[in-house]
Image (cartoon, rainbow, N blue to C red):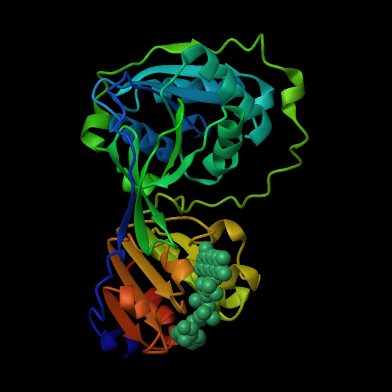
Amino acid sequence: MATRGLLGAIGRRASPLSVCRYLSFTSASRTISTLVIAEHEGGSIKASSVNAVEAAKLLGHDNSISVLLAGSGQSLQEAASTASSCHPSISQVLVADSDRFTHSLAEPWARLIQLVQQTGVYSHVVAASGSFGKNIVPRAAALLDVSPVTDVTEISEPRQFVRPIYAGNALCTVRYTGADPCVLTIRSTSFPVDLQAADSKSNEAPISQVDLSTFEEESIGKSRYVKLASQDTERPDLGNARIVVTGGRGLKSSENFKMIEKLAEKLGAAVGATRAAVDSGFVPNDLQVGQTGKIVAPELYMAFGVSGAIQHIAGMRDSKVIVAVNKDSDAPIFQVADYGLVGDLFEVIPELIEKLPEK
Ligand SMILES: Cc1cc2nc3c(=O)[nH]c(=O)nc-3n(C[C@H](O)[C@H](O)[C@H](O)COP(=O)(O)OP(=O)(O)OC[C@H]3O[C@@H](n4cnc5c(N)ncnc54)[C@H](O)[C@@H]3O)c2cc1C
């Protein structure tokens, strides 16, 4: 029976190789006020944006945190209302109500951030490092004439941050010495929200409308929204799921990949994939985990037919427990796995599906 062949922990995860430091002057203490760029969907602020608020909280004790939401219609108003009580550290929610922002195009959003910065004069601008933040923040930083610090995993001081480099194999401590605002994207999995604190409904931050009367029409830019192609799925969001089941090229076809989906269904898990699986057309690229995909840190990460290339590890190495199944005992995935099974996934997965109880 394949599942009996568990090798145990083949190798504990290696900690990043080194820490390099770029230090210069120590900035004098100054007032901190932060603008958090938030994403919303279906009338709720996204969990990763709440992680960005949590990160902003670490910038300073008396940090005044404003959350910026934009879009239009009922779902924006509902999101503003949930945002106002989603985290006790939020001082105010700013709402930019216009169709221009509905599809999260970078050009109008970047202009909006510039406009809000002109009135609010924030010391920091923070967004989660998902596709929304990665799309908008560099353009906003360019308009503000500052250099962004991306993918921050630790805030040591208001202007000193730790971020991974070389696909997560080294951590770099960066001191920001530029002009205000200090623009950051943060890795949401590195700033888990203290749910007890966040649950306290004692905070109901005021909601204000952003004055868009000076918003320049030409800032809509050259990009146009065409359509949204997404799959309706009941599965948890890959970026925030407690369990992720990932398939690699070892699955061999999109038909076989359905086994991964079935197993994920049984476990109430999100589905992930390697870039090789995506490039082979097994699954769409929004499931890609890794350096150029999504960064995940679930409680349980299960990898089937995944070799463990450095670029894949970069996206899942912070998972609490990693289980790997691969027929090659020398596969590098076993170096980061807590539990490794040398076996054929075409035997192991059906057996797991059969033995696991219904949800
Ligand atoms: C700039 C750059 C960025 C990249 N970004 C990413 C990224 O974000 N995410 C990412 O995943 N990759 C990324 N890659 C690609 C990465 O280098 C690897 O090519 C990719 O991760 C390999 O995917 P894989 O493990 O599915 O495939 P392979 O490396 O082909 O491994 C397949 C594995 O399946 C095993 N296998 C085969 N059949 C079975 C079976 N029946 N049972 C059990 N095991 C089996 C094999 O032993 C093998 O270990 C990037 C590469 C570059 C250059």
The foreground one among 315 and 249 is: 315
Q: Position of residue 345 (x, y in %)?
A: 44, 83
At horizontal 60% and vertical 67% (from top left) the residue drawn is: 278
Q: Is residue 10 left or right of residue 310?
A: left
Give the vertical position of 135 relative to 56 (above or below).
Answer: below
Give the vertical position of 220 relative to 172 (above or below).
Answer: above
* Count of picture labels: 0
At horizontal 28% and vertical 33% (from top left) the residue drawn is: 58
Q: Position of residue 24 (x, y in %)?
A: 34, 39
Q: Is residue 210 left or right of residue 338?
A: right
Asked where in the image residue 174 lies, by quadrant, the reply is: top left
Q: Position of residue 252 (x, y in %)?
A: 58, 81
Q: Is residue 77 visible?
A: yes
Q: Position of residue 307 (x, y in %)?
A: 45, 79
Give the vertical position of 94 relative to 260 (above or below).
Answer: above
Q: Is residue 71 visible?
A: no
Quarter the N terminus occupies: bottom left
State the residue lying farthest toward the front.
Answer: 25
Asked where in the image residue 124 lies, by quadrant, the reply is: top left
At horizontal 26% and vertical 73% (from top left) the residue drawn is: 338
Give the vertical position of 91 relative to 249 (above or below).
Answer: above
Quarter the C terminus occupies: bottom left
The foreground one among 160 and 226 is: 160
The foreground one among 260 and 276 is: 276
At horizontal 64% and vertical 73% (from top left) the residue drawn is: 280
